[in-house]
Amino acid sequence: MKSTYLLLICFLLSYNMQSQEQYLTKNGAITFFSSTIIEDIKAENNQVLSIIDASKSKMAISILIKSFLFKKALMQEHFNENYLESDKFPKATFKGDILNFNNVSSLDAKYDVQGIITIHGVSKEIVVPTIFKRNGDTILVKGEFDLLLEDFDIKIPRLVLKKIAKEINVTFEFNHKPYNR
Amino acid sequence: MKKIICTLFIFGLSLQYSAQDLLAILDKETPQVDQIVTATFKGTRILNGHSIENRKDKELEFLISHRFGRVNLGFDELFGLDQSNIRFALEYGLNDDLTIGLGRSSFEKTYDSFLKYSVLKQKKGANSFPFAVSLFGSIALKTIKDFDPSDKRTFAESLFYVGQVLIARKVSSSFSFQLTPTYVHRNTVRINEDPHDIFALGLGTRIKLNKRVSFNSEYFLNFNESKSINARNSLALGVDIETGGHVFQLILSNAITMIEKSFITESTDNFFEGDIHFGFNISRTF
């Protein structure tokens, strides 16, 4: 009887392993731009975590707000203290599905990624057209989209209203490698 | 029956395992990095005295500060507004940790210069550290010619030195405090009984009221005092208002001066009897 259980556990575990076709990166890049007539603001984050579960056509991203680097240190401080409140909301996340995603091997195309993005404690559903490219055993994912600050309850004081764009352009590039836990 | 339940249980566990949330995996994979605690105070001053905050690398700050006369002077002096002490200063970040400053106060026509160096930073994470330490040193030169010609001071006799250790902790995003052991040396004193060296301990706090406004307080406890004047400990209350590149501070203080050697050792006014000086600091960072 004991051996039956062992067999069952082994079977389940192995089934489990086979079903995981996961790809991960810990140094994905996200850049955002705010462009106005008065001032262009740009920030970069090269420590973004992203994971793809190819077998389930799922994707998740985790972004540490404090890892965004600005040209001006004071801007970075304001970004963390006053706008994104990174003490209260240290991370931004995304979790969603890669739509009509068939097979990793046939990867080299544009897919829509649909899911929930959470920034500043506010969640919103978005759809982002994304390029997936297979390069050896890595998967490169890149694209861009726009976000409205007011959608995420990020308020801009009247005094700097003309310096910060209402719509922020976000670009991303993640180079995932096979991931075995 | 037991066997079936057991099997189901194992099966259920394994299912759960395979369905583990992708975000949970990312959480697990997030590297543990040290995070330096920032914005312990908003400005480079708590109110009168320096905070641990430095100007950042290659940043130039222009500071304009005013302290008016005592509010209890009454209507004739427009509650002190007829008198004013003004200090202009330029402060520059040589790098993220070292700030140099030059200033000039109209009160006693005093020039001052200082260096402030951040030695230790408060950190969160794997190598956390509970507080931040900065060192501050300044030299002030009094140039007013209020002496009898026969009593003329030499250049050296007009100098004052201040050394401070700034120890601060941001307890939460809404509360920070700082302890400031202070040493002041005066090359010249008024009478022989006055000490050349004065020791004091400063306590400063910041309470954040909302995203852009905080309430600050600052008190310096002197361990010895000048005998020639009725010196009092310095007390200041005020608010920081932040607007983009500016920090605007409104201050009520028993000192009319804004440099360490003066407000710590030469204040004679009694805050609680209404000898309150209204003032402000405006800074613009370039």
Image: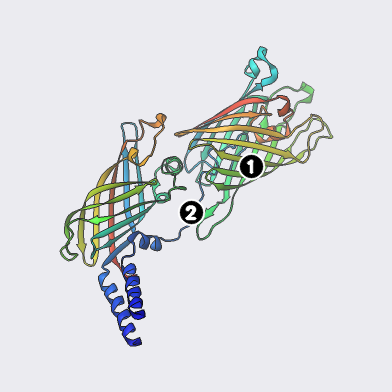
For the residue carrying disc 2, how many other residues have a C-alpha within 10 Å: few (<14), some (14-19), or many (20+)? Answer: some
Q: Residue at x 53, y 54 (%)?
A: B123
Chain letter of disc 1? B
Chain letter of disc 2? B
SS at circle 1: strand
Q: Residue at x 43, y 48 (%)?
A: A89
SS at circle 2: strand
Check the image and report above or below for A170 versus B247: below
Q: Is residue B156 visible?
A: no
The residue indicated by pointer 2 is B35
* In the foreground, B286 or A50: A50
Q: Is residue B247 visible?
A: yes
Residue B264 percent coordinates (x, y): 70, 35
The residue indicated by pointer 1 is B137
Q: Is residue B233 left or right of residue A114?
A: right
Q: Residue at x 18, y 59 (%)?
A: A101
In front of the other: label 1 or label 2?
Answer: 2
Q: Quadrant of the C terminus of chain B?
A: top left
* In the foreground, A15 or B102: A15
For the residue carrying disc 1, how many other residues have a C-alpha within 10 Å: few (<14), some (14-19), or many (20+)? Answer: some
Marks 1 & 2 on one chain: yes
